Amino acid sequence: MNASSRVAVSLTLDRIVDGACLLTMPLLAWLAVFGHRGAVLVAGLTALAIALRPSIWREGLSLLAPARLRAAPLPRAAAAGLLFVVWIAITGFWSPTPGAWKLSLGVAAFTLSGGALVFEAARASDRRVRRMAILFAGAVTIAAAALLFEGLTGGFLRSVVPPVDQTPLRWKDMTALARGVTFIAPLVFPAAAILWSLTRSRALAAAPIVFALLASLQFTVSANVVAILFATGAGAAALLRPRSAISALGALFLVSLIAAPLFAVAPADAVLSAETPLMPVSWAQRVNLWKETADRILEDCLLAGCGADYTRAWAADAVMIDVPGSPIPLTEAPIHPHNVFLQIWLELGFLGVITIATALGWGLKRLAAIEPQPLAFAAITAAFGASYISFMLEASLWQVWRISILSLAAYGGALSYSVMCSRRS
């Protein structure tokens, strides 16, 4: 292929990727309100378009070359991540949940999607980066505003768009809207950084964060409020000390992962036996779940884990418990532990912990080697912080839409960094 043909192919691929962004970014704003699980489509369709580039395959496969593994942190992070995915599949052989090995495919697919999105954001021309950044920031801001509107109006948009929710007090609609806030919580910080970089308007930059925070206050999922506030604090720290803040947050991830079995000492018995509720019902149930999960880790699942999706089988046979403040008995075990760190120990064991910790450690080392752009690093740190709270309080490793959100957060962080670099050049 001669030079002119290569240029023509490259321009065609650029148009395909740009077309995918034009489709998926408005879809992001819609799905945040009407179907949070559609985060899979937003991340996946764009990544599939990027995957048409031969260069991404060459670059990706070359990461596993022995020479690169010896020389740089990113290939080591990629290799550890690959081992983590393979180990998920292997644990499916002793999981009590049939077909559990397939869960590795979702983790792999949307980890690769995140890599593809970052690849595109890092290598696109300044003009294309600006266009992609505007689409991303605009979609996230509209989504945050729409979720706030839904919170203030009791879900007006969902009430007029079929299907009609017939659950008492429209419980499913309200829960879905809270999950929509979970969807955008890590994304509003890269969006804010992009808006500031492009407009230099504090009001516009603050808008997505303020909308998301106010929206989170309208629903009953307090983890969203905690996530946005914690992320805001982490981002503010990163403005002052970019590398130190993101390294500290990475260390917090690693400590939380390694120390997760210490939940075995949680005072669950005291919480459940109290004459008056010591905390909200859902939190009391969660404290008991975390203790029971840690006990099972230490008794049966420490080394190799009890198998991917083990908690689903546990939930099927779980006993009912009385929780102070609840008018009815509640299950001891939902289908996941509501703590990703505990879930990795329980279902994947020490080998799962060591592979994902290695991947995270080398990934952080690679990020720390990049020339810091304070605002972009603040956005990345804040998105990382929102994800940390979600991992600690509510998420599951097997909810693919949540991994898709991480992919989109990485994309937003890469776009914000690229926009900052283009302004300086």
Image (cartoon, helix red, strand yellow):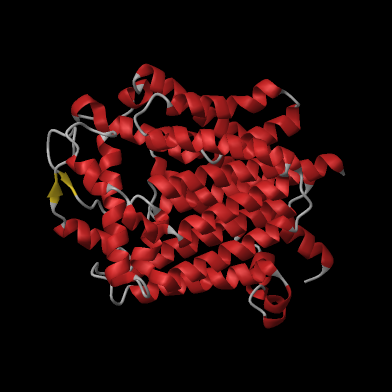
In the image, farthest residue toward the right: 425
- Residue 8 sits above or below residue 349 on the image: above
What's the residue at 48%, 62% (across, down)?
Answer: 109
| Viewer-closest of 264 and 108 | 264
Q: In this view, does 382 lie to the left or right of 199?
A: left
Q: Can residue 10 be seen in this view?
A: yes
Quarter of the N terminus within the rendering: bottom right
- Residue 63 sits above or below residue 159 on the image: below
In the image, farthest residue toward the top: 153
Q: Percent x, y for residue 243? A: 71, 50
What's the residue at 34%, 27% (across, down)?
Answer: 158
Quarter of the C terminus within the rendering: top right
Q: In this view, does 177 lie to the left or right of 67?
A: left
The quarter of the picture where residue 101 lies is bottom left
Q: Percent x, y for residue 366? A: 69, 61
What's the residue at 34%, 30% (across, down)?
Answer: 220
- Residue 317 sits above or below residue 239 on the image: below
Q: Can residue 132 be seen in this view?
A: no
The quarter of the picture where residue 49 lies is bottom right
The quarter of the picture where residue 260 lies is bottom left
Q: Percent x, y for residue 191? A: 62, 36
| Viewer-closest of 286 and 362 | 286
Q: Percent x, y for residue 321? A: 15, 47
- Residue 279 sits above or below residue 40 on the image: above
